[in-house]
Amino acid sequence: MKFSLSWLREHLSGDYALDDVTGALNRIGLEVESVEDKAAKLKGFTIAYVVSAVQHPNADKLRVCMVDTGTGEPVQVVCGAPNARTGMKSVFSPPGTYIPGKDMTLGIGSIRGVESRGMLCSAAELQLSEDHDGIIDLPEDAPVGASYVDWIGLDDPVVEIAVTPNRADALGIHGIARDLAAAGIGTLIETPIAPVKGLYPCPVSVAIEPGAPCPAFALRLVRGVKNGPSPEWLQAKLRAIGLRPINALVDVTNFLTFDRNRPLHVFDAAKVHGNLVVRPAKDGESLLALDGKTYALDSGICVIADDKAVESLAGVMGGEESGCDEGTTDVLVESALWEPINIAQTGRRLGLNSDARFRFERGVDPAFTVPGVELATQLILDLCGGEPSEIVLAGAIPDTTRVIDFPLALTEKLTGLVASDAEQVGTLAKLGFAVEGTSGTVRVTPPSWRGDIEGKADLVEEVIRIVGLDRVPSTPFPRDENARKPVLTTLQLRTRKSKRALAARGLVEAVTWSFVPKAQAELFGGGQPELALANPIASDLSDMRPSLLPGLVRSAQANADRGIGDVALFEVGQVFKGERPQDQFIAATAIRRAFAKPTGAGRHWAGRATAVDAFDAKADALAVLAAVGAPVANLQISTDAPGWFHPGRSGTFRLGPNVIGHFGELHPSALEALDAEGPLVGFEVLLDRVPEPKAKATRVKPLLELSAFQPVERDFAFVVARSVAAGDILKAAAGVDRKLITAVNVFDVYEGPGIDADAKSVALSVTLQPREKTLTDAEIEAVAGRIVAEVTRKTGATLRG
């Protein structure tokens, strides 16, 4: 919602500045989004006189102008405007001026060999209009050297506020002024709307079909009008808030839309055939609307029609055929009430937004329906002349009166704000509420324009909003011997911890669609009929996602297509394995592409760059599992990863029969289906399947025991069948003496000459940590023998010679 400061002053008298207004608006819940001060933006532009304008010696379409800027000797300006001529007055910008329409700062230049020390400007270059056919042509009495914005009256700031859906009354400047007056900024100007006497019966009647979403419809004919451009004061108001003036009749309706939050519509009576009827559209009907587009209609859309065809989309936009132009002499003025839900549905169905729709779908003041016609009629008579008819009212204005018993003590009880009874009653009265009583429990009647006020808590909100949130005391939580209990669930904590863990490993968080194409859903284990969307937002987003991987892969490829190939992304969100609640999981997923290694992305001069591999994804997954408290030491890793991973370069995390997640390199066929290029690795962990931590530890952690004796390392190389997992060799070696053996690591795997084709060599490093005495050579050899024997027994390995 936009308004200019001068427009606000027509509804709010008093001595206040722009900062007073913006500060109060933020305090009372009408958040200021921007303040546009054209005077500050255009302060360098002045009025100048063109002393002479002669043909450029080297260009047919340029003129060399000598310009009197009012500051001394004339300056030379090269100008290409067709209307540049000797003796005219225009707007001049000296070197160093910022030209908003061109997004450039002007300098001294040479154009076709002739120096130019400034610029004569068009309205488009000053962003005052779209006119760029010539420079601004000012009247003879324009004062040379004066500031252009001061002379034309553009020193009027425009404020834009964010209006929440429940505050429809703040979509009119009068409603904003009422709130500001209640908050102590100025005094509200209340001018009674005098009825305009009808001189004859309205020749056009209105009928509302049963069931049509229109409680009331007011109509009046004004004949003998002279339509044309609206006066400058009205055009300036509309231009200030970003509206284009059209003609006086249309400008009056736009003015009242923003001035009083009362959308209206005007029909050219000569183009209306017979009487009007409010009814559902018929299948197959269409309308050429005022925006120049033709809309196909159906029975769910409410329209205003005459005896021949549809004339208007009810509450959204009028039709081109019955629109008012300069030839209009008789005009029908419409002020109607529409059901908000139907207006919202019509706008969404047709993809059509308008200022009228924006207001009607939030609810306008029903009591202002007829006064809106009266106010519009008076403005039309003032600007266009004419003779008004009597008002025809179809339907009835709904009675929205409701009385709320409001205990004034409830304000302090709910918010802690201490405000006297008189202050609360006075605040509500300034906002237009009728209050019976002065203390204790009062009876409050909300005004017709506040349809959002339904109960006592709403009245408390109004009081605290106007009196001021800054008066609510800060009260600390009581501190006692009982610690405050955590409020986050285990899954919420895991979600946060997993995001932190992945971000710490250099991955960037992404948020992707919860929907994927059906083919991708089937590729990743989904695609069940019950997970297909009944109303997808796009044809390629038809199914609920069974995995986060498709969205992340598409995002990574989109980055690669734009030249950023080394991408590491993660997402923590919902995946859907079925339609039941227990089939929905929170997954932590990450992918790495190309050279996006955990140690740093991209190539580097200090070493050879290597592409990402399955072990990078495994390390990312283990970091998440450790962060969320999974028993990492007890995890089993099997090679039966799903089909979208590369066999032999992937794995599955298990705790017994419980599958927690998968990791690995994506299969080439999966990348092809996703229209992506590798190398690309990733993992997915289902946080819901990580076992809950035990409520109490079953045993106390042993004391830290630091040995004073030197650890001993021994290396072993075993030849085993290729099918034997290195993890099985590690477990066998570590199980020989869990107290003495403190670490077992694989440091080499070899396949090639000297080894059978179906075998491999796995080299282990075993750390022995004595705790009671230094180990002798014989003791070390004994342990080594046991290690060889145990590994041989469990894996069929032989010690490599």
Image (cartoon, grey):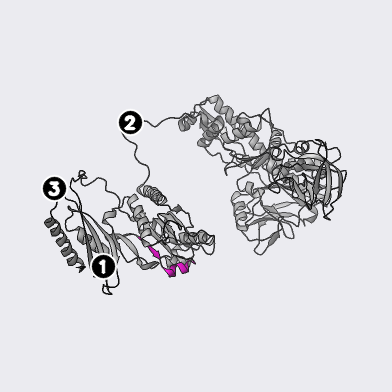
Query: Which label lies toward us, 3 or 2?
Result: 3
Kindly identify which residue carries mark 1: 761
Q: Kindly give the residue lying farthest to the front in the view shown.
A: 606
Where, quadrant-wise, is the C terminus in this rendering?
bottom left
Please tell me in which quadrant of the rendered image residue 632 appears.
bottom left
Mark 3 Cα shell of 10 Å, populated few (<14), some (14-19), many (≥20): few
Residue at x 47%, y 32% (from the top left corner): 415
Question: What percent of the width, then of the height, locates residue 751?
Answer: 30, 70
Kindly identify which residue carries mark 3: 772
Q: Amino acid at mark 2?
A: Asp
Cα separation, mark 3 vs mark 2, equals 49 Å
Kindly identify which residue carries mark 2: 480
Q: Earlier in the sequence, mark 3 or mark 2?
A: 2
Residue nearest the observer in this picture, 336 or 735: 735
Residue nearest the observer in this picture, 658 or 432: 658
Residue nearest the observer in this picture, 582 or 62: 62
Q: Secondary structure at mark 2?
A: loop
Relative vertical location of residue 603 with respect to residue 222 in this rendering, above or below = below
Question: What percent of the width, then of the height, locates residue 558?
Answer: 52, 60
Mark 1 Cα shell of 10 Å, populated few (<14), some (14-19), many (≥20): many
Q: Secondary structure at mark 3?
A: loop
Task: Say left or right for 743 vs 445.
Answer: left
